């Protein structure tokens, strides 16, 4: 699969899944506009892409808890291109702990702001650029924590709240943007193995039924969904959790 005619925006691509996705999409020929909370983190991923001569990448700072920072990210991308084809809402702060009282108010606010408000505002600010694409797709990395009744994670309730907010937002958006041809595709993975694509472990991670889901498999799901003809609106990916 080649993505030479795709412009992709990815949030929180300074490390882990966002970085892996940025490197993979760029390697397939996409032009990647990647952000991280700090410009330095985004530039590290951009430089790794450029150093390998694999695709075009641009780096931006975007703090998902700050509406002005999100607007600035969208404005800066709009200075480079008149449209984007793929928006990946990847960034969301994780918060651990089953005790509601064990974290600070600031941690709760930050978790909800980055995952919930940040996802809504990034989507809102990039929608005009998506609507200028002939093949617009919005991908959101949710979590099993965004599923009704899910209780297997030890994540804090604020993280559950952020992920359920993402789920509610993408659910209604999928219906409302369908007439304009925008596909809203959400992934609800359980915990997955987050290897770096530039590490030796990337291609050698065990991928049998007894093994945890890998980020490489999740990226393959995204590639499958965006590679479908435009009559095929895959709305969500769900995964059976290991025993
Ligand atoms: N890993 C899993 O097992 C798993 C399972 C299910 C769903 N997910 C979801 O998949 C996505 C990617 O997962 P991951 O494991 O790669 O995430 P992660 O390792 O927890 O990293 C979170 C990312 O979000 C960024 N972030 C946090 N707060 C931010 C803010 N205010 N502004 C900008 N960026 C911010 C972090 O940037 P900094 O480096 O600056 O902190 C980091 O890049 C997330 O939405 C996550 O909830 C992950």
Image (spheres, rainbow, N blue to C red):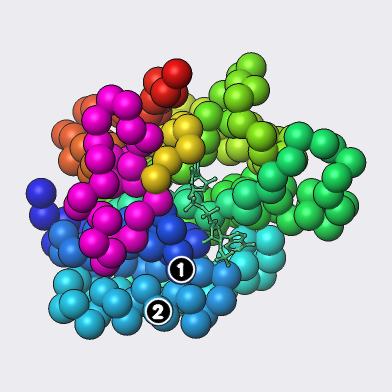
Tell whether circle 1 marks a residue whose Cβ is less than 8 angstroms from ligand 1: yes
Judged by its main secondary structure, the magenta piece is loop
Residue at left offset 83%, top offset 57%? 106
Total marks drawn? 2
Mark with earlier residue (2, 1): 1
Are the residues tagged 2 and 1 within 8 Å (C-beta)?
yes
Label 1 secondary element: loop
How packed mark 1 is, by other alpha carbons closer than 10 Å (few <14, some 14-19, many 20 or more), is many
Q: Position of residue 12 (x, y in %)?
A: 49, 62
- The residue wearing badge 1 is 14
Residue 141 appearing in the image:
yes
Frontmost residue, 20 versus 132? 20
> Magenta stretch containing residue 197, yes or no?
yes
How packed mark 2 is, by other alpha carbons closer than 10 Å (few <14, some 14-19, many 20 or more), is some
Left or right, residue 57 beside residue 161: left
Q: Which residues are magenta?
A: 194-219
Quarter that holds the C terminus: top left
Task: Calculate the distance from the C-alpha at mark 2 to the C-alpha at mark 1.
Answer: 7 Å
Frontmost residue, 115 versus 128? 115
Q: Position of residue 154 (x, y in %)?
A: 66, 34
Q: Quadrant of residue 236?
A: top left
Residue at left offset 16%, top offset 78%? 53
Left or right, residue 166 beside residue 203: right
Frontmost residue, 206 versus 146? 206
- The residue wearing badge 2 is 44
């Amino acid at each position: 699969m080649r993505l030479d005619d795709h412009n992709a925006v990815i949030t929180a691509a300074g490390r882990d899944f966002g970085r892996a996705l940025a490197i993979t999409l760029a390697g397939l020929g996409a032009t990647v506009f990647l952000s991280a909370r700090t410009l330095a983190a985004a530039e590290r991923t951009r430089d790794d892409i450029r150093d390998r001569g694999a695709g075009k990448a641009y780096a931006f700072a975007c703090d998902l808890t700050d509406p002005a920072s999100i607007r600035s990210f969208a404005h800066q991308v709009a200075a480079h291109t008149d449209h984007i084809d793929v928006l990946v809402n990847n960034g969301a702060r994780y918060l651990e702990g089953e005790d509601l009282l064990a974290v600070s108010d600031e941690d709760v606010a930050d978790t909800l702001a980055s995952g919930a408000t940040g996802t809504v505002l990034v989507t809102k600010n990039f929608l005009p650029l998506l609507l200028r694409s002939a093949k617009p797709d919005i991908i959101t990395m949710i979590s099993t924590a965004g599923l009704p009744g899910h209780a297997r994670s030890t994540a804090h309730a604020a993280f559950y709240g952020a992920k359920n907010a993402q789920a509610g937002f993408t659910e209604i958006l999928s219906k409302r943007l369908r007439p304009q041809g925008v596909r809203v595709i959400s992934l609800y993975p359980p915990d997955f193995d987050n290897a770096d694509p530039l590490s030796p472990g990337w291609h050698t991670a065990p991928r049998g039924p007894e093994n945890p889901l890998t980020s490489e498999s999740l990226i393959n799901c995204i590639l499958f969904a965006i590679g479908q003809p435009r009559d095929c609106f895959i709305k969500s990916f769900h995964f059976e959790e290991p025993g």
